[in-house]
Image (cartoon, rainbow, N blue to C red):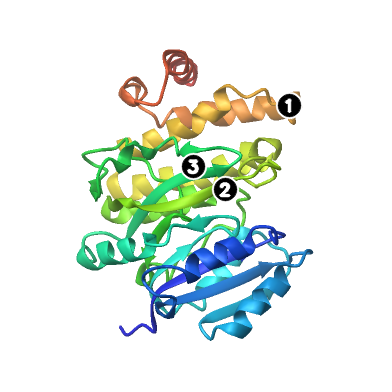
Amino acid sequence: MDYKYKISIIIPIYNTEMYLEDAINSVINQTIGFENIQLILVNDGSKDNSEEICLKYRNIYNNVIYLKQDNRGVSSARNNGLKYVEGKYVNCMDSDDKWEKDALLNMYNFMEKNYLEIDFVSARLKYFEASEGYHYLDYKFEETRIINIEKEPEMLIFHVNSTLFKSEIMKNREFDTRLKMEEDCVFINTILLDKLKYGVIREALYNYRKRNANNSAVQSSKWNKSWYFDTPEYAWKKLITESIRKYNGVIKYIQYVLIYELIGRINCEYVILNYLEIKKHLEIISEISKFIDYDAIDTFRLLDSSEREIIRKIKEQAK
């Protein structure tokens, strides 16, 4: 298939005028050459001056597309942008983040060399602004390579914003609009279940903004009831179902994904939930634990001894 561009970048935008030009300019300044990139800006009902910024760049560059919709969330905005993709590869970056200038060239070249073996490649994720350092799961970036999750099930991947996908595998896929957070987790790992392999590039860097204002969707997730109920229902259960459908069981990698997700919930104070909601949430965790083997609990490298013991007890009580 012929593609007009090497890469399409979709940026969903909601009230991020303070950061948006930094994000756009990080794409324009890529060493792969901006003429090889299609930039799709999707305004998800912003009430600030984001539209003026988008129109400014659309009027300067003929490879910039501007879309505007009512506020329906990041998943809807990404799905809208996917309809206009004309690049061989596609990325969905966030409007407050930045790419290092040679990241997309490194990722493009890696995908070209390994096109038949993998469906996506991921860059390292490094925090800036309110926090510094690399993401908790950065251990998988010790070297540039292809990871086989059957052999290395602890090499978890969650972020679409730092990932470059084949456009051809995105055609019949959508982000789940029922999810307010962790839509990335189910999207990328559903794709991963097809080939059980993906690429990582140590030399490619995605700069992830931890806002000083502490008001991003991820930073405020624990204050949203969707994190406690919709995520297990539409993300965790989807991954369980897909793994069972394809491999007649929940593979160890998906078990590790579930354990990773449980870690943040077993130590919660549940400040926004009432008694009945807490009870319901604990029942959900108990039900999910049935799909996790004791061996996975005992071997997962990111659990400390107290977390390991808590999850074991949850599983024992769920029998």
Relative side of 50 to 32, left or right? right
Sequence-first disc among 2 and 1:
2
Task: Tell me residue 131's x, y (percent).
Answer: 56, 37
> Where 213 falls versus 205 (above or below)?
above
Element under disc 2: strand
Residue at 67% across, 69% down: 43
Task: Tell me residue 68's x, y (percent).
Answer: 68, 74
> Where 50 falls versus 5 (above or below)?
above
Residue at 59% across, 27% down: 283
Give the quarter of the image for residue 249: top left
Nearer to me, 9 or 169: 9
Label placed on residue 236: 3
Q: Amino acid at mark 3?
A: Trp
Neighbour tally class for label 1: few under 14, some 14-19, many 20 plus, Cα within 10 Å: few
Q: Amino acid at mark 2?
A: Arg
Q: Amino acid at mark 1?
A: Val
Relative side of 70 to 79, left or right? right
Residues at marks 3 and 2, CA–CA distance in whole angstroms: 26 Å
Mark 1 lies on residue:
271
Sequence-first disc among 1 and 3:
3
Mark 2 lies on residue:
209
